[in-house]
Image (cartoon, rainbow, N blue to C red):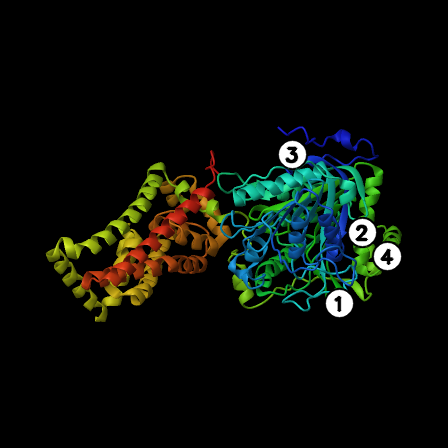
Amino acid sequence: PLNANVRCMTVAAFDRRPAAPPLLAQPGRNCRCVVRADRLGLAVDGDVYFRALHHALCAARRSVLLIGWEFDSRTRLLRDGQPQAGPNEIGALLDHLVRTNPDLRIHVLIWDSAMIYAFNREFAGLVKMDWLTHRRLRFRLDDSHPLGASHHQKIVVIDDALAFVGGLDVTSQRWDSREHLPDDPRRSDPAYPTYPPFHDIMAVVTGEAARTLAGIARERWFQAAGERLVPPSPGDADRLWPPCLKVQLTGVDVAVSLTCPSWDGAPSVREVEQLYLDMIAAARRFIYIENQYFAARRIADLLARRLETEDCPEIVVINPGEPVSLVERSTMGVARARLLRRLRQADRFGRLHVFYPVVAGEDVKVHAKLMIVDDLWLRVGSANLNNRSMGLDSECDLLAPAMVEHDRLAIRAMRHDLLAEHLGVGPDTVAAAEAATGSLTGAIATLRGRQRTLVPLDDREPAEIVQLLSESSLPDPEEPVETLVYLDQALPGSARRGLRLRTRAMIWLLAVLSVAVTLLPWVTPQGWSYAAALVTGLARLRDQPLAAPLVVGMFLLGGLARVPVSLTVLAAGLVMGAWLGTVLSLIGSLASASFLYAIGAHLGRGQVRRLAGWRVNRVNRALARHGIMAMMLLRLMPVAAFPVVNLVAGASAVKFRDFAAGTTVGMAPGIVALSVLGDRLGVVLRSPSAAGIALLALATALVIAAQIGVVSRLSRARSPAPNRPQ
């Protein structure tokens, strides 16, 4: 049930306009709720958005909630000598506002970014924004999400009365004017004195829609910071509305759609994806898309089916040109090229048209996330058209329908305005060309070719290493991998209990072994002398020619006998030393894993299913879709017995290349830690000393802490098992 502030969209809501569109937004299916936006406008590009944000922040009285993917406190909001009140940099401005208004509280929540982005982000941002600012300015980094996920929503809410939502973060390399001038000196930020033209969009809403977005922001704050924020009394939307923004829709019921991965006991939410699918299915005349990516699997499947039919609408996609970074080329670049090739093969009637914008020969980076269908539905948000945004990253989109004829004309005007920006003409010119040609693509064809223009995008794939990286599915998974490959859920109940017992037993064994070795010289000197002699004798084996093959053979036999691989690694470190033990353990583990993989492949999926039960189907699909990433996670986190993982992987569709690479990378951290621990055990047994005992205790504590941390994270990532075969 929805609360009193949320009103479901009904067919009656469209009865006030002729030719009412079909019901699209359905709470519980493709949106969280449908709420009234008293006003809605679009802030197109960073210049307009930053000016609008500056005005709203300076007018704030009680509360500012800012959540996003990235943040840079040095970002200048106003440029080119625009008049301003207070500091211009966002960090200094927020601090100034709370110091001058004792009733104001500001909360900033930003994704705790992965290491891959660490060097591109502001150094010591947490220190600058939390430790060195007023106590009523709270800044937190959000890491409360599954492995490999990110919090990607971009929401700013002022006094629970006005809200921004869309694709723009308040950070570097985001500002640009709508002209996208080449070499614009204003397009300059700290550490980035120059960067390419940049295009993005934020929606601005007031009324119930703003309060709903405030609730979503507070939910995220509680999940990340563990603190419940008290909502303020809604402020004055008239005073907060930025003068630089035109009100384009009034009194419209907007749907709020989310993506939330399953995490910490909460089920996954895939409303964003379902809304995309429903909009594509509902389209009759055209689909207009502006998006940073074009790589979502399920959306491509539906587009391909529609393109094969004679009644397929025109589909116009505005994407960036060639991705700049290796990561983007190897993931979204290759995925887009393959998706386009597939869609063009399905496009029997010439309905698909994909472009990228260019100004004076320079590509404009499209970062917007906008979709307009038949001028009846306007959608703006943070969700990219890639797999991550459908199920892994947190996202928030708004859908505004044309509730009356005036709304339809307003949405059409927004579309004409956006196309005019890309084509270097006025909106009236776009409208006239569309009327003359009778189609959206006809208007684009007529107006292309100026200094600012749209260029058709081909489907050439990036080359070399890019191809290899793309096939791993590592950077663009569809769902949280923890929940997909939780193999103990695919096993019978007795096996699951055994895995939990083995994990606890390993922790206790390490602790007891370290304590026993430490006390042995003083409790039983004779026993210690025997142990020292044994370890010294074993250590001499490392110089023998057959030592390496024997260690590798020990791993092969241990895998067949279901001996925990961690004990074998520990023994190899004790006998061969830290570094040689690490190398041989990696080789032995991979050899054992490959042998069992071959057995699983020989037995086939049917035999493995009979062994593990019907839930293994879920694991098979996960391994096939996620490849290297799934294998890395299974090796890094002790969710299933080593032999079971190898057998299931062999019976699945996962490629051996992905299996071997994921096994090597995923097992390396644990093997290094256990090899060092085994080596320290040997040193203490041979010649106990205070320093040696201290190092042994430290190594043991680190390994145990890692085990406990992994188990704790998996318990948060666990989702309920399905109650029927999949």
Q: Which label sits on residue 27? A: 3
- Which mark, by number, is residue 426? 4
Which residue type carries mark 1?
Asp
Among the two numbered marks 4 and 3 on one chain, the one whose residue lies closer to the N terminus: 3
Q: Crowding near pointer 4: few (<14 within 10 Å), some, many (20+)?
A: some
The tag on residue 244 is 2
Circles 1 and 2: CB distance less than 8 Å? no
Q: Secondary structure at mark 1?
A: loop
Q: Nearer the viewer, residue 572 or 702?
A: 702
**Label 4 – label 1 distance at C-alpha:** 21 Å
In this rendering, the answer to whether 613 lies above or below 88 is: above
Q: Residue furthest left?
A: 526
* Of labels 4 and 1, the one closer to you: 1
- Please state which of the two labelled residues, at mark 3 or mark 1, is closer to the viewer: 1
Q: Would you call the spot at circle 2 few (<14 residues within 10 Å), some (14-19), or many (20 or more)? A: few
Q: Position of residue 660 (x, y in %)?
A: 41, 59
Q: Earlier in the sequence, mark 4 or mark 1?
A: 1
Q: Residues within 10 Å of mark 1 (few under 14, many from 20)?
A: some
Report the mark closest to the observer, 2 or 3: 2
- Residue 533, position in %: x, y? 14, 63
Judging from the image, what secondary structure is the residue with disc 4 in? Answer: loop
Task: Answer with mark 1 or mark 2, whichever residue precedes in sequence.
Answer: 1
Label 2, label 3: how many angstroms apart (C-alpha)? 33 Å
Rendered residue at 80%/64% (across/down): 452
Tell me the amino acid under the disc marked 2.
Cys
Residue 533 lies left or right of residue 205; in this view the side is: left
* Residue found 78% across the figure and 43% down from its top: 239
Q: Amino acid at mark 3?
A: Pro
> Residue tagged by mark 1?
184
Q: Regarding mark 3 in the picture, which secondary structure is present there?
A: loop
**Tag 4–tag 3 contact (CB < 8 Å):** no
Can residue 103 be seen in the rendering of this structure?
yes
